Amino acid sequence: MTTDEETTLIGKIEEYKLMVAVRTDTPDKAYQAAEACIKGGIRFVEITFSVPDAEEVIKKLSKDKRVTVGAGTVLSIGDVKKALKAGAGYIVSPNCDEKVIKFTKKEGAVSIPGACTPTEIYNAYKAGGDIIKLFPFVQIGGLDFLKEIRGPLPFVRYLLSGGLNLDNIQKYLDARPSCILAGSSIIKRELVTAEDWHGITAIAKKFVEKISESLA
C-alpha cells in the first residue's frame, strides 16, 4: 500500500523528471558534487552506496530543503536501514530484489528497483516497486526497448538509466518516462578530479533548463 506521502513524492519525481546519481571515491567529493547539482536546480539527488560513508552524505543532504535525497546501489536490507536512518526518501537499486523492495515499502519509502527483462520488470512491479529503473538502458535497447515493453506492461512507471545527454534529452522526454537518471553526463569525472564544482553546476543548469523548456 502506497501512503499519501509516497504518492506525493512519486508525483514530484514525475513532475521534475530528472534525478542525478552521485558516485565518487570520497564522501566529501560526493557532497560537493551533489551541492553543485542542487545549485544548478537539480531537485532529486541519489547518493550511491559505492560512495564511502554514503549514509553520512545522505544525512547531511537530507537537511537541505532544496533537494530530496535518495540512496542508490542499495543491495541489501541492511543498506536500506542505513539509508532510511540517514534520511533517504527513496531507495534505488541496480537489480530486482523482492526482499529489499518489500522492506522499503514496509518502512514507508519509495522503491525504485532495477530491471532489464520483462520478467524482472513485472516481478519488481508486483513486489511493490513504485518506479522501475530500466538498467542498463542503452545496452538493453534504449528507447526502442521502452516502446516495446510498454505494449504488455503499460501500467508500470519507468525510470531511464543511462545514455542521457543534452542532444538526446528531448527524445527521452518524448518517450514519457516517469523520470530520467543522469550520472556522468552531469557529474563529469574530469570535473570531479579538478574539483570544478562550478562546472558541474553549469551543466546541471543546462539540463534543468532543457527540461523546463520541453515541459512548458
Image (cartoon, grey):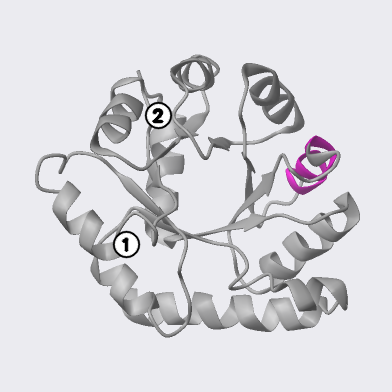
Let me know if residue 214 appears in the view.
yes
As shown in the figure, which amino acid type bears the numbered disc 2?
A: Asp
Query: Foreground residue, 23 or 214?
Result: 23
Residue at 61% across / 75% down in the picture? 204
The residue that appears at 39% across and 76% down in the rendered structure is: 169
Query: Which residue corresponds to mark 2?
Result: 4
Question: How dense is the environment of label 2, judged by Cα within 10 Å: few (below 14), some, or many (20 and up)?
Answer: few
Up-down: is 61 above or below 87? below
Report helix, strand or loop for mark 2. Answer: helix
Q: Main secondary structure of the magenta part?
A: helix
User: Is 67 situated left or right of 33 in this image?
Assistant: left
Q: Residue at x 43, y 49 (%)?
A: 135
Q: Quadrant of the N terminus?
A: top left
Mark 1 falls on what kind of element? helix
Q: Position of residue 97 (x, y in %)?
A: 47, 23
Q: Nearer the viewer, mark 1 or mark 2?
A: 1
Based on the displayed image, in which of its 4 quarters is residue 72 positioned? Answer: top right
- Pick the residue in front: 16 or 97: 97
- Name the residue: 41% across, 24% down: 3
Is residue 56 one of those drawn in magenta?
Answer: yes
State which region is magenta.
55-62
CA distance separating discs 1 and 2: 32 Å
Q: 127 or 163, which lies in front?
A: 163
